[in-house]
Image: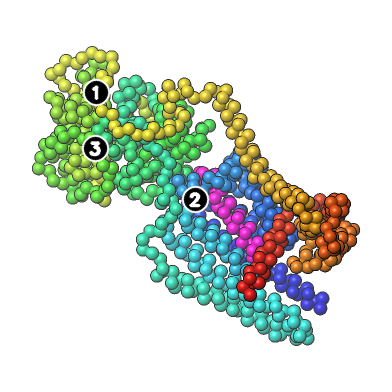
Amino acid sequence: MRDTSARVVARRASAQLIDLAYLAAVLGISVLGFAPIFGGFGYLIGGFGGLLLGLGIAYLGARLRWDALVVAAATIVAYFVLGGGLALRSTTIAGVIPSLDTLSGLAFGAVLSWKQLLTVQAPVAGFDQLLIVPFLSSLLAGVISASLALRLRQRWATALIPVVALFALSISLGTHETVEPLVRGVLLAGLSIGWVAFRRAESLAAVSTADDLIEYEGDNAQPVAARSRRAALAAGLIVVGLVVGFATAGAALPASQRHVLRDTVVPPLDLRAYPSPLESYRKYVRDFASTTLFTVSGLPDGARIRLATLDLYDGIVYNVSGSGSEGSGTFSRVGTQIVDTRAGTPATITITDEALAGVWMPDVGYLTALRFGGDRAGQLAEALHYNSATGVAVTTVPLVAGDSYTAEVIVPPTFTDEQLAATTAARLTMPKSFGIPDSVTGAADNAIGEATGALDQARALATTLHTQGFFSHGLQGDTVSRSGHSSERINTLLTGDQMVGDDEQYAVAMALEATQLGLPARVVMGFYPANAAQGSVAITGSDLHAWVEVDFQGAGWMTFDPTPPKDQTPQQQAPKQKTKPQPQVLQPPPPAQAPAELPPDVLSDNQKQKTPTDDWAGIWAIAGVAVNVLIVLAILIGPIVVIGVLKARRRRRRATAGRPSDRLSGGWSEVVDTAVDLGASLTPGTTRREGATAIAERFPESGVTTLAAEVDHGVFGPGEPSDEQVAVFWSEVDVIVRAMKKSVSRWRRARGRLSLRSFWDEWMRRAARFTEKRKRARR
């Protein structure tokens, strides 16, 4: 018999190991689903670290018989103690020890990181705080699924719920890739079928194992054969599940793209907070003509530096819309890696800011990676947004002198007119502009003449403006040329005796003309030095330009320069001396819009005067740290306080019941609940004397047997006990409770204070009584 017991125990231990191995495999498959979101392998540390941590906590809880509250407390402690090393390494001390920033980041990340993940363009490499998502989700899935699998003997299949939930979460938070979720789904289904078959066979075998071992104690062949058949059945089900899954997966795969959560989440960047960069064009060429705005190294020959792409005209300014249309794209938060499959020449550039203030970041071509340097690298990375359709990068924390970044880019190829001769304009949806003066249509028709092809028309527009117009910045010594590109200013340019302006007016005029002809066109404001040089190049205000891009089918956006040469100036008019360009003519204001909230660094001078002083800023910073600490403490200590309050209220309710006999019953319930929370096992429905016997076996010096007899006499005896007798009885209850607590270890007492087993037993008793009453009522 001793040998039989040992074999049964060993078999159960091996079953637990199989459960853990299965859960590690299927949950690991689900963790791999985060790959398209994060890119690289960094997410595996958090995902698999949380998974193994969760399985370990669940296993210890099952072996040491922790109740649900202790398991939950252990999970919370592990999350805050080990979460820094697994998910927020950049905030830890020596990469392991959590700092105050680590605890704060984990506390807020548990709530905020989910939506933040959806508003960042995949892959999100570089956002350490977003690693909380795979870490926390796998930690919770591991703890819950393993706890259910290891503890439940009847409804063990509920352990599949967290497995499926984690798998679905990795898909919902992911991208539109379909092959990887398909393969993982087939593997998960096959392994789950095998595990269910194993647990089913295990449950059936557990009922008959002991009898089989006794009956065939002299001959073990038949039990061994039975176990072999069950193992073969489980293996067969695994193979069948895999084969059927792979066979049917191709037919079940939808042809259209999947819908994921990030499709319904709108990125929070509001471009109305930032004025059109083209409005500052004349300021840069006037005030920063010889000032180094930034330096760039690694600039390819002939490449242009893009500052902003403007695609929406409202009659007053040409602005960056980011409307979400195919031609305009959207601005999304991005990490260090950016997916871009365009053809072109790869290059690596490094830009260091000197005097270029603002939120618009110079770049070249289209980004595939970007890493900040300097003291503000982390802050700028958090504020980075990028529009992959227009190639524009924005940081909501404006650049200042000393900021630098290195970008890996793709420079699109260039084509000759001969190569583009047979191409047509791309069928691209662009933001609908308005407020375009009527003169634009007439000027466009006159410029293109008999040209019908898209390239011929675009080239005719650029050539007409380039050859018939005159150049002037309107600075001191120049021909009069007002700044701005409003509807009135463009109309004056096209209908005046002479076309006089600079890049700002000519680029806008051509883009509007192209738009009226049905060509997808946009204005680009950026830089290209007059004389490119190897190594580091200093970019000044005199290098600032604006040009037009038109999209051609199969070729992409091609560049056109409609601005006349700088030496092409009006000769018949004497230049007028002036110290500064004339102001723009006041235009009717656009429809009123709700004011956008500006980042602190782009507020006006008047607004800055209303911000708190440095002293108040310091006080608020300290207050913020204090709030973070309080939140972390509330998370850690809150459950302990709540449980203590609930138990105190329960004891007070029992001790102050209306009838004396109810107070006696309440005192006995207090003793029973204390014993249960300290680890005693009582069978539901037992009498007080039977319960007292069970408690006495666990706590022999408690004296509960005499107490049970007193309760029965007071409850079932004649009359009601006096208040003095009840008070003495409760004094005995307190003595017995203290004796039971002193008889166990400190760790057991601490677990008892946090245990919810007594509440659970009470709820089960109430549910049983309610069910019994309903059965009687039906009779």
Q: Residues within 10 Å of mark 1 (few under 14, many from 20)?
A: few
Query: In the picture provided, is 712 more to the left or to the right than 225?
Result: right
Distance from disc 3 to disc 2, alpha carbons, whole Å, reads 40 Å
Residue 519 x %, y %: 21, 44
Earlier residue among tags 1 and 3? 3
Indicate the quadrant where residue 6 lies.
bottom right
Residue 662 x %, y %: 78, 57
- Look at the image and tell me in which quarter the N terminus lies: bottom right
Q: Give the residue type that dot 3 points to.
A: Phe
Query: In the picture provided, is 305 more to the left or to the right than 610?
Result: left
Residue nearest the observer in this picture, 657 or 584: 657
Distance from disc 1 to disc 3, alpha carbons, whole Å, reads 19 Å
Residue drawn at x 76%, y 85% as measured from the top left: 215
Q: For residue 742: magenta?
A: no
Please tell me whether mark 3 or mark 2 is closer to you in this view: 3
- Look at the image and tell me in which quarter the C terminus lies: bottom right
Would you name the residue on which mark 2 appears?
38
Q: Residues within 10 Å of mark 3 (few under 14, many from 20)?
A: few
Span shown in magenta: 125-153
Q: Give the residue type that dot 2 points to.
A: Phe
Q: Which of the numbered marks, if any, corresponds to residue 434? A: 3
Q: As drawn, which residue projects farthest toward the front?
A: 719
Would you name the residue on which mark 1 appears?
585
